[in-house]
Amino acid sequence: MLNDQEFMRYSRQLLLEDIGPDGQEKLKANKILIVGVGGLGSPAALYLAAAGVGHLYLADDDKLHISNLQRQILYRTADISAGKAALAAEQLADLNPLVNLTVISKRQNKTSLTNLVRQIDLILDCSDNMATRHAINAACVETNTALISGSAVGFSGQLMVFEPPYQHGCYACLYPDQEEPQRNCRTAGVLGPVVGVIGTLQALEAIKMLAGLSSHLSGKLRLFDGRQQSWSTLQLTASPQCPICGTLSFIDKTVSGKKIA
């Protein structure tokens, strides 16, 4: 049951018929792993903590650099050189002390991610490199865990939702090449509000899914053009040759994944 403090804190979203006390209880009962608390993870973590998600796991092995401050809104100039995950936890605890926070400052690989994801209800991929993205995807497929993936470069952003049983494929179906693309944030730059848009929408989809609402982005790729303020949507298709989820085509597609609501 929600206590008086929780009713007051979350009163505006409790008024929503799609959330209400039942949806808020679901948010409180669930665990989210955010991999990367940088440009994408900063707004995502802020909104998820503010919304009352019960437990946030913050995974990031980077230390704050002055160049991060243009878009990573969780941090301040005085924080430079400190570890991002611990800094993020401090800020989120100040925002909402009712949320449980776990700091993971060690760089994750496929094995460690798989062990971690088994404890988690939903994953937000807010990382900035292909190796981590593929490791997250593989861990989610192996553990039947839903994944919300975001990325941004320049004026452009991408948003995807992958849910078990992965009828529309996984991240590796869309991007089988694990080589780092030549055009990325470090080489081409990125506008701060663009990563803010994508990270915020990652949080929106997470809140909806945890509260028991369906995601209309499941199995789709949403592309954002910040120059034109326009969106386009592509339907994803599973690849039978995918080394991560390709074998799922030979099993019963009605098998459900983790229950996150």
Image: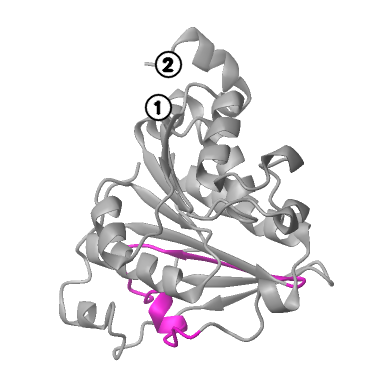
Residue 148: x and y, percent? 47, 59
Q: Nearer the viewer, residue 64 or 167?
A: 64
Q: Secondary structure at mark 2?
A: loop
- Name the residue at the top extreme: 4
Which residue shows up at 54% across the image and 55% down it? Answer: 62
The image shows residue 17, relative to residue 152, as above or below, that is: above
Helix or strand or loop: what does disc 1 sit on?
helix
* Position of residue 148 in the picture relative to residue 200 (left or right): left
Q: Is residue 25 above or below residue 192?
A: above
Give the mark nearer the N terminus: 2 vs 1.
2
Per the image, the residue denoted by label 1 is: 25
Residue 85 among magenta residues:
no
Three-letter residue code for mark 1:
Glu
> Which residue of the protein is positioned furthest toward the left in this rendering?
251
Residue 18 can be seen, yes or no: yes
* Magenta segment: 154-179
The N terminus - image quarter: top left
Estimate the x, y position of residue 155 in percent, counting from the top left: 77, 71
Q: Quadrant of residue 246?
A: bottom left
Q: How many marks?
A: 2
The residue to which callout 2 is attached is 2
Residue sitting at 44 percent across and 88 percent down? Answer: 177
Q: Quadrant of the C terminus?
A: top left
